[in-house]
């Protein structure tokens, strides 16, 4: 009986050793399996992360390309519009305003002698001539003796002239019917006190700091020419 018990004990010990070995082997395999799974998961995560970064970078590059193409298209369209506008403007000027363009170029060449004020150019002479000769000089310059339309222009003339200057006003054709050189009738004036008073002897007008004065057209004075800058 004792031998039987001993035999049973030996079998039990063997069984426990086998169990421990098997258990240990299973645990090792489980660990290896888990580690393989973790490695596979980590590899997949890194692959997914790299793919996401690549997609982000690719999308950013695509946006940059689209923005660049849009800017190029806008620039080309703008250049075409500007070129079209220039061509249309040149054609319009050439077909409808040839004389105006020539006159403006002439003004640009003479600008150092002219004074700009309220859309007109004014020339103050440095010589002294009769009213008729003064007007002829203005006509040669593509202008005429000044026509004063309002108080502002009168004050402007007084500032730039200093002394008396011929203006484009006369009653040489009909006594006391004062007309400007463009044929319009004077409706209001800036006469000096007691003027006009010359009757048939004084048919041309000059102005100085105190106002308009009629005088003999053969007298010598400086003069002011005026031309409009618009056609």
Image (cartoon, grey):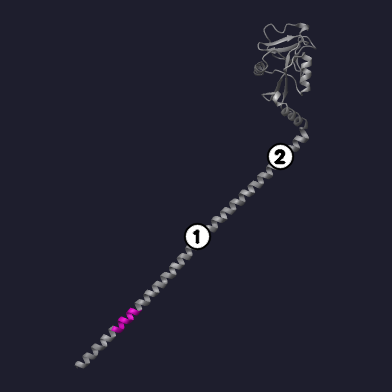
56 on left or right of 160: left
137 on left or right of 45: right
Write down the region rendered in magenta.
17-25
Give the residue drawn at x 35%, y 79%: 25
Would you place residue 26 above or below residue 61 in this image? below
Q: Quadrant of the N terminus?
A: bottom left
Tell me where residue 208 appears, x and y as whole percent: 68, 12
In magenta stretch: residue 39: no
Residue at disc 1, secondary structure: helix
Whether label 2 touches label 1, CB < 8 Å: no
Give the residue drawn at x 61%, y 50%: 70
Would you place residue 68 above or below residue 55 in this image? above
Would you place residue 80 above or below residue 151 in this image? below
Q: Quadrant of the C terminus?
A: top right
Which residue reaches farthest front?
A: 126
Tell me where residue 47 appears, x and y as whole percent: 48, 65
Marks 2/1: CA–CA distance: 49 Å
Tell me where residue 181 appears, x and y as whole percent: 76, 17
Which residue reaches farthest left?
A: 2
Give the residue drawn at x 55%, y 58%: 58
Would you place residue 219 above or below residue 48 in this image? above
Residue at disc 2, secondary structure: helix
Chief secondary structure of the magenta portion: helix
Identify the image quadrant of residue 211. top right
Q: Is 188 in front, or is 141?
A: 141
Numbered mark located on residue 43 in the image: none
Identify the image quadrant of residue 175. top right
Numbered mark located on residue 86 in the image: 2
Q: Mark 2 vs mark 1: which is more N-terminal? A: 1
Residue behind mark 1: 53
Give the residue drawn at x 50%, y 60%: 53
Mark 2, Cα crowd under 10 Å, few <14 / some 14-19 / many 20+, is few
């Amino acid at each position: 009986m004792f031998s039987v018990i001993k035999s049973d004990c030996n079998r039990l010990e063997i069984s426990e050793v086998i169990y421990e070995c098997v258990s240990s082997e299973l645990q090792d395999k489980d660990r290896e399996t888990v580690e393989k799974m973790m490695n596979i998961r980590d590899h997949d995560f890194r692959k997914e992360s790299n793919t996401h970064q690549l997609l982000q970078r690719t999308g950013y590059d695509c946006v940059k390309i689209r923005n660049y193409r849009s800017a190029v298209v806008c620039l080309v369209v703008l250049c075409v519009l500007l070129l079209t506008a220039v061509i249309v403007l040149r054609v319009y000027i050439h077909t409808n305003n040839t004389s105006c363009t020539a006159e403006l170029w002439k003004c640009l060449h003479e600008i150092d002698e002219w004074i700009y004020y309220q859309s007109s150019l004014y020339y103050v002479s440095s010589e002294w001539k009769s009213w008729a000769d003064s007007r002829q000089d203005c006509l040669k310059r593509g202008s005429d003796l000044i026509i004063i339309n309002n108080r502002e222009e009168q004050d402007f003339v007084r500032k730039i002239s200093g002394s008396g200057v011929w203006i484009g006003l006369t009653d040489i054709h009909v006594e006391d019917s004062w007309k400007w050189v463009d044929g319009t009738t004077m409706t209001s004036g800036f006469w000096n006190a007691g003027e006009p008073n010359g009757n048939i002897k004084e048919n041309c007008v000059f102005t100085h700091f105190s106002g308009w004065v009629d005088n003999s057209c053969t007298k010598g004075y400086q003069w002011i020419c005026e031309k409009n800058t618009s056609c």
